Amino acid sequence: MTFKVVHYINQFYAGMGGEDTAHVKPSSQEGAIGPGMQLDQLLGEEASVVGTVICGDSYYGEHMDEARAECLRLIEAFEPDMVIAGPGFNAGRYGVACGDICAAAGDELGLPSLTALYHENPGVEMYHKKTFIVETVDSARGMRSALPKMAELALKIIRKEPMGPAAEEGYIHRGMRRGFFHERTGAERAVDMLLQKIKGEPFQTELEMPVFKKITPAPPVVDLKKATIAICSSGGIVPKGNPDHIRVSSAEKYGKYDISGINDLTPDNFESIHGGYDRVYALEDPDVVLPVDVMRELEKEGVFKKLYDFAYTTTGTGTAVANAERFGQEIGRELKEAGVDAVILTAT
Amino acid sequence: MVREIENVAGIPVVQIATIVPIMMTVGTNRIVPGVAIPHPVGDPEAGPEGDRKKRRELLMRALKAMTTEVHEQTIFEK
């Protein structure tokens, strides 16, 4: 039998136009069009592009829920065995749409999926754990090299062949680790790696550390005497009784606490619930982690204008980076809206 | 958290914590090294007065950090 593949592309690759048609709603056509024709050939006898689903990039980006639902409906109508999207290279909206369709095909239709993107495409960060993403260069000049890699990996997936490590198979890692018996012990491999490092030779770690982004520093506060300053902490300082039930570790939320009438944190009004450090001092005087007392003093002295009425706190131990980033984004939006000029964040 | 607040709000976020390499890794731009992990902005072992004095000193340094223009990740030691 021939496996059935549905290919997702945007308005541009469907030949509908560029930005002027980026608002077109989802539609579908029988068979392959655009880059799908080459893909269909590369899939050979074993698999065939039976249909193409098309959506304008802006429409997808601006109406994600509707676009996803409609695209899934169109995909399902072809009764496919797999969904392939793109390649989207470094096109932001298209890359996100490709990743989103692939992820949804898996989550909602139970179909395997694959796309191909440039590693900095925002769709990679968002969806690499949910689908196979073949790494491409940043523009469509990489079409010729991307399609054969996509076809090869697609066939492997569709045949349900055992999948090797991301780096060997040519897709972006999905954050998965599979246990297996290695012929050499961890100690031997670690020493080898160390020797390679000392010699300045290339080596491959077995445990990738997360890579954090860097940002351009925000401009400084111009006039401190007119500034409203907020305090935040990942040191687990919360009102006594922990009203929001923030977890002692691996926090999934943060609290926003009114400190407007408070001049001093004491064991009667606040406490530390942090599970990652010795809380003796913080329980005795929570100001050693969330410095309300001295901030209030400096406010009264007129060193700066105002201590912002709310403090944001959470527990920063074992907390997923993605959660910490989300907390920061939500807090940042609120502080911006509140007209806060700067933040002091303490961490334990 | 620090990085994303600064990124979204476009305002300086000064971090006071003890492990400087972690602040460098997560992308904090204005760093004030704290006293110790369980009490970054205090020195309870120095008694109530010494504790408060230390807290004030660190917060004054944080205020200085937020009013200082920086072009890269900067550690405010003094």
Image: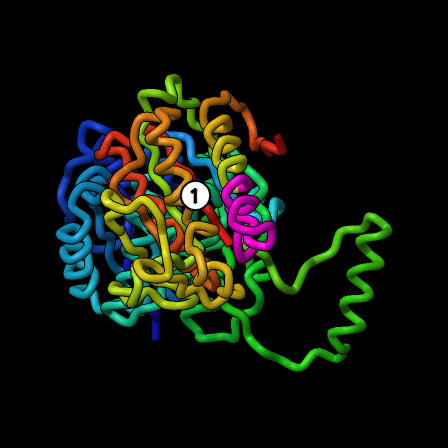
Q: Residue at x 47, y 64 (%)?
A: A318
Residue B12 lies in what quarter of the image? Answer: top left
Of A103 and A31, which appears nearest the observer? Answer: A103
Q: Which residue is mark 1?
A: A345
Q: Is residue B41 magenta?
A: yes
Report the amino acid beneath label 1.
Leu
In this image, A253 relative to A43: left or right? left
Query: Magenta segment, which residues?
Result: B37-54
Chain under numbered label 1:
A
Residue A315 lies in what quarter of the image? Answer: bottom left
| Majority secondary structure of magenta residues | helix
Within-10-Å neighbours for mark 1: few <14, some 14–19, many 20+ = many
Of A128 and B54, which appears nearest the observer? Answer: B54
B74 shown above or below A144:
above
Q: Is residue B14 magenta?
A: no
Q: Residue at x 60, y 50 (%)?
A: B46
In this image, A97 relative to A342: left or right? left
Task: Indicate the position of residue A162 as horizontal and vertical percent values.
Answer: 52, 75
Task: Indicate the position of residue B28 as horizontal and vertical percent values.
Answer: 51, 39
In this image, A172 relative to B21: left or right? left
Q: Mark 1: which secondary structure? A: strand
> Could you tell me if residue A38 is visible in this image?
no
Of A159 and A347, which appears nearest the observer? Answer: A347
Task: Indicate the position of residue B15 as horizontal and vertical percent values.
Answer: 49, 41
In this image, B67 relative to A74: left or right? right
Q: Residue at x 82, y 66 (%)?
A: A191
Residue A284 lies in what quarter of the image? Answer: bottom left
Q: Residue at x 42, y 61 (%)?
A: A129
